[in-house]
Image (cartoon, grey):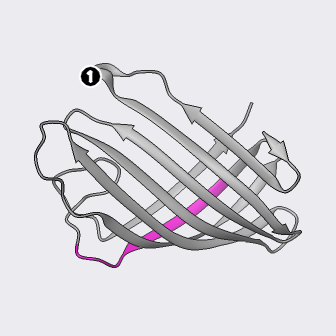
Amino acid sequence: MKQNNLTIEGFSYPLFLDSEEHASFLINYDLFEEMDVLLEGFHDTYVNSNRFRTALLGRYYLTERIYLLSGLELEREAKKDGGTPLSPRLGILSGAGYEVQENFFLEARANIQFNDSKLGSLGEPVIPTPALYSLGGKFKF
């Protein structure tokens, strides 16, 4: 949905094995032609826990298709067995992206954790992840 300078998007994957579910939203506000503010949210259910990850980002377009982004990301978990969750993971996120066409983009990101959480990234409960580097993309249809 786009209204004036505000765009709201959402997506949910179907249920996987073990009733895993993955959903996300994106709220984008255009400050001016070269600069946006983004609020991203991701909810993931895994076998042992539920995870919610959110990021507040600034995105600056260097050209019509190439941009830089930076901001903060927070990830929390809720244990399904009622156990005490690990402390939240807080990180500084930065990256760059390329809009290949209007409905397809590629993005590289680095997330450097700056607190002492033992919460691993992307649902990994065993190995703490002080840094996460990712390359991804999105195709909208």
The span shown in magenta is: 106-116
Mark 1, residue position: 18
The secondary structure that dominates the magenta segment is: strand
In the image shown, does 34 or 3 lie closer to the viewer? 3
- Quadrant containing the N terminus is top right
Q: Is residue 5 left or right of residue 27?
A: right
Q: Is residue 69 left or right of residue 83?
A: right
Above-or-below relation of 41 to 74:
above
- Quadrant containing the C terminus is top right
Above-or-below relation of 93 to 140:
below
Q: Residue at x 78, y 41 (%)?
A: 103
Q: Residue at x 89, y 52 (%)?
A: 4
Q: Quadrant of residue 34?
A: bottom right
Instruction: Residue 5 in the image: state x and y as whole percent.
Output: 84, 57
Q: Is residue 102 left or right of residue 128?
A: right
In the image shown, does 9 or 120 lie closer to the viewer? 9
Above-or-below relation of 79 to 55:
above
Q: Residues within 10 Å of mark 1 (few under 14, many from 20)?
A: few
* 111 in magenta: yes
Instruction: Residue 58 in the image: state x and y as whole percent.
Output: 66, 71
Instruction: Residue 84 in the image: state x and y as whole percent.
Output: 12, 52
Q: Quadrant of residue 20?
A: top left
Instruction: Residue 49 in the image: state x and y as whole percent.
Output: 23, 40
Q: Amino acid at mark 1?
A: Asp
